[in-house]
Image: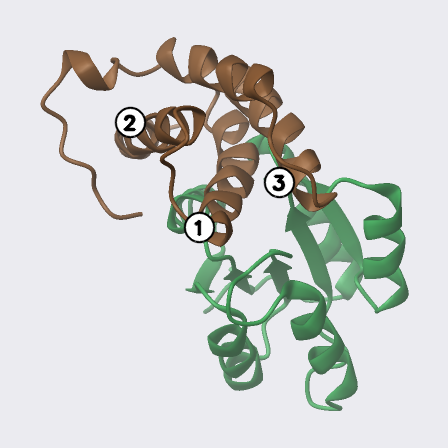
Amino acid sequence: MSKPCIVVIDDDPMIVALVELRLGMAGYVVESATGGAAGLTLVGRLRPALVILDWRMPDMDGVEVLKRLKKDRATASVPVMMLTAQNRPQDVRAALDFGASGYMVKPFKPDDLVARVEKMVRQSGVVWMD
Amino acid sequence: MTASALSALEALRQRFLVRAQGDLIAVQRTFDGRGEDEPAFRARIHQLAGAAGTFGFGSVSEAAIVIDDQLIAGAQASAEDLRRLIDALETIVPSSSDSDFTELGS
């Protein structure tokens, strides 16, 4: 049976690879997109347990992706955690105002990311199916 | 953590170091006044700020974050801060003049 699916949207392929690897080691199914538009499509198709979303991306920034996810009834309930180097308090406030459920600043410790993801998935009510 | 997982993480770290060599060259060029265009440089610095510390190179992230904050505020990166970032990068990768490194795409 499948475990929760996490979608990571980040234009930095090194970050994507690291998140895929680390969350994969923790037992998650991880799908990824390296752009905002592709990420929107992926989330719409997979309805994951959690989206991990970068802010600064060239084609569509993360806040725009967040707004669109929350505006679409099909994806509005999917929790989103921002994972970004944007570290100003006003950035955090803005993301939370637009519907983000969590915010983690880069650089980050991969173990901390796993812990945060586990907590958010638990809170979202997704049942692990081992 | 299994041996294969550790091996995979180390491989990723090595890939980051290869990319950091390209970052070092780009920052040196900017320091010398012959750098890439501003959007490309901003994107590079922003990625470096986020990724370097994540891969265990905190001093590089710290130096890049200072420049990233300046660029976000619409200012130019100062020579002093560029120098600091170059110094930090040089502690983790060989100097561009010391290698025949061919820059890889990110």
Image colour for chain A is green
Q: Residues within 10 Å of mark 3 (few under 14, many from 20)?
A: some
Q: Residue A113: which disc?
A: 3
**Going 61% across and 24% down the picture, which residue do you hit?**
B78
Number of the front mark, 1 or 2: 1
The residue lying furthest to the left in this view is B100
Q: Which residue is mark 2?
A: B21
The residue lying furthest to the bottom in this view is A73
Where A8 sits versus A119, above or below? below
Residue A63, image x and y in percent? 72, 66
- Return the disc, 1 or 2, that comes first in the chain's sequence: 2
Residue B21 seen: yes
Whether discs 1 and 2 lie on one chain: the answer is yes
Where A112 sits versus A74, above or below? above
Chain label for disc 1: B
**In this orientation, which residue lies closer to the viewer: A100 or A114?**
A100
Cα–Cα gap, marks 3 and 2: 27 Å
**Going 26% across and 30% down the picture, which residue do you hit?**
B18
Image colour for chain B is brown
Q: Which residue is mark 1?
A: B40
Residue A91, image x and y in percent? 81, 51
Label 3 sits on a secondary structure element that is: helix
Chain label for disc 2: B
